[in-house]
């Protein structure tokens, strides 16, 4: 504990005891029948009686007249307290209040001479005594790690954080409602799996002692959702938590939220249209505009139609029309001329992917669907009938990052088994044999898509980091933080 805080903490503890000596519980009881600050403003009527509960976030002492602001989940509202109007015990409690205390009030609505909507308090109840002072006299937390570590204080003191996280809440609700309206069924699939499948990523491993078996936190729900297609559920989705034991960055958190949806008898083109309607609608609904400003000064225009461009064409536009005729050595030289740093002896496909990531993906601000990726990059998608070197997929690039991939799903069990085994090499224990067996029962042709919910929330809120839209991002324990 900071020595500077010690006197403040001692003073609050003393007030706590003084409240108790008055026969008042400093941690209160239920206070039913309240309206939110938003509801009160929305049903404004001079003289109407209301009940309001919230945290004291400001206090102006004008002698007998006291002006305070209460903050709840919606916003702030001024309350006006005349000391003589309070009962003796209420006045004694009022004089022991601090910023950060939570109170309930009853009173009537009026507008001050300055034009501020207010509640004229007739009775006041202490609901929770705050024992710690709040940050920086309500100017907000500044240190980024402190804001993420002490999210409760961040939410109390920083309006920007409240808005970003509230947008995330509204986004998840919008996505769910949109898919329900399209006839999709929401399901839940296992978060602990015996084989970590559905994506190429390093899983977190745990152990179930009673069954004597290793388990993995899921890296994707894909293989389970496809089993439901086999079972006859033709339109399914899941808003799920995935876990990948990989690096942390502005765009990555080890625990993250994905939306995955599968639609029998559709394909990647149908899923692209679904994604465009869903994300474009979310942007318009949640921000009120097609154009959404970003933290780097750019503006994303979500209004459709969104362009679609083949992977090869996108690469050739930045690397030259002859790119795919070059030898790996010539590709490496040209990539370095374009300013890329490459690991030695990369295969041609890997060099091409580096060029795509740095010169196409990292430059695309407005939405664009990149289609027909190389087959070796996407083992779960159908080969294109006209060109079997590519697969029928899209990657939605938005705000200089991939937001949503979509496939025409591979439903040939023999080809899928071959691709799985090629992908894992000698690590055959990583092949989900149960999924392959299910596929042999017959999965209908289908389109599938994934959507990074955290990343989309980041872009729609104009946040500069995925951590701003995750309530509790992963952090190092405080004692070993840098």
Image: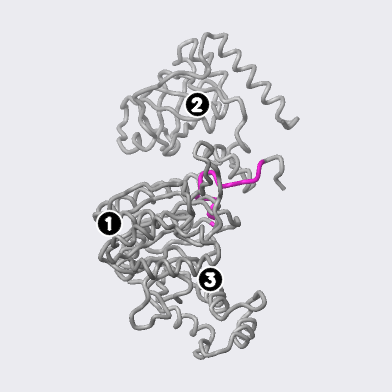
C-alpha gap between disc 3 and disc 1: 33 Å
Residue 123 against residue 373 in the figure, above or below: above
Would you name the residue on which mark 2 appears? 102
In the rendered image, residue 474 lying in the magenta stretch gets the answer yes
Instruction: Bin the neighbour count of mark 2 within 10 Å (Cα to Cα): few under 14, some 14-19, many 20 and up.
Output: many
- Dividing the picture into quadrants, the one containing residue 157 is top right
Q: Secondary structure at mark 1?
A: strand
Q: Which residue is mark 1?
A: 235
Residue at mark 2 to residue at mark 3: CA–CA distance: 47 Å
Q: On the image, numbered disc 3 is attached to which residue?
A: 362
The one nearer the camera, 417 or 49, is: 417
Question: Which residue is at 46% across, 57% downward?
Answer: 197
Residue 261, how many percent across, how many down?
34, 57
Eyeballing the image, is 386 above or below 282?
Answer: below
Horizontal relation, residue 48 to residue 148: left or right: left
Label 2, secondary structure: give it: strand
In the image, the segment drawn in magenta is 464-477
């Amino acid at each position: 504990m900071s020595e500077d805080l010690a006197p403040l903490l001692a003073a609050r503890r003393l007030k706590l005891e003084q409240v108790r000596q008055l026969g008042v519980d400093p941690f209160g009881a239920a206070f039913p029948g309240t309206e939110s600050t938003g509801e009160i403003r929305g049903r404004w009527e001079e003289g109407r009686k209301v009940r309001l509960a919230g945290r004291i976030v400001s206090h102006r002492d004008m002698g007998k007249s006291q002006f305070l602001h209460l903050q709840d989940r919606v916003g702030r509202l001024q309350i006006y307290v005349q000391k003589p109007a309070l009962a003796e015990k209420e006045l004694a409690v009022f004089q022991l209040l601090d910023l950060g205390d939570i109170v309930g009030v009853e009173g009537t609505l009026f507008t001050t001479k300055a034009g501020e909507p207010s509640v004229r308090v007739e009775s006041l109840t202490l609901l929770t005594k705050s024992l710690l002072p709040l940050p920086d006299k309500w100017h907000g937390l500044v240190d980024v790690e402190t804001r993420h570590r002490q999210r409760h204080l961040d939410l109390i003191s920083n309006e920007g954080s409240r808005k970003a996280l509230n947008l995330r809440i509204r986004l998840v609700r919008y996505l769910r409602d949109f898919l329900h309206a399209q006839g999709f069924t929401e399901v839940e699939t296992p978060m602990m799996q015996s084989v970590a499948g559905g994506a190429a990523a390093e899983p977190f491993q745990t152990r179930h002692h009673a069954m004597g078996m290793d388990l993995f936190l899921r890296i994707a729900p894909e293989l389970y959702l496809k089993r439901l297609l086999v079972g006859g559920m033709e339109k399914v989705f899941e808003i799920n938590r995935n876990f990948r034991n990989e690096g942390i960055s502005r765009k990555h958190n080890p625990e993250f939220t994905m939306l995955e949806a599968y639609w029998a008898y559709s394909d990647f083109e149908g899923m692209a249209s679904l994604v465009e309607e869903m994300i474009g609608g979310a942007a318009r609904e949640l921000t009120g505009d097609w154009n959404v400003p970003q933290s780097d000064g750019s503006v994303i225009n979500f209004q459709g139609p969104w362009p679609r461009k083949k992977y090869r064409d996108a690469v050739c536009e930045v690397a030259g029309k002859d790119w795919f005729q070059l030898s790996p050595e010539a590709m490496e030289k040209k990539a370095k001329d374009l300013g890329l740093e490459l690991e030695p002896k990369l295969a041609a496909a890997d060099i091409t992917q580096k060029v795509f990531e740095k010169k196409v993906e990292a430059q695309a601000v407005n939405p664009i669907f990149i289609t027909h990726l190389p087959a070796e990059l996407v083992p779960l998608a159908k080969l294109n009938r006209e060109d079997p070197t590519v697969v029928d997929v899209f990657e939605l690039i938005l705000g200089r990052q991939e937001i949503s991939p979509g496939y025409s799903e591979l439903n040939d069990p023999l080809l899928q088994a071959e691709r799985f085994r090629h992908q894992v090499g000698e690590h055959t224990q990583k092949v989900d044999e149960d999924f392959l067996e299910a596929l042999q029962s017959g999965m209908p042709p289908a389109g599938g898509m994934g959507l990074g919910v955290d990343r989309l929330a980041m872009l729609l809120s104009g946040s500069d980091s995925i951590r701003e839209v995750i309530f509790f991002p992963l952090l190092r324990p405080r004692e070993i933080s840098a």
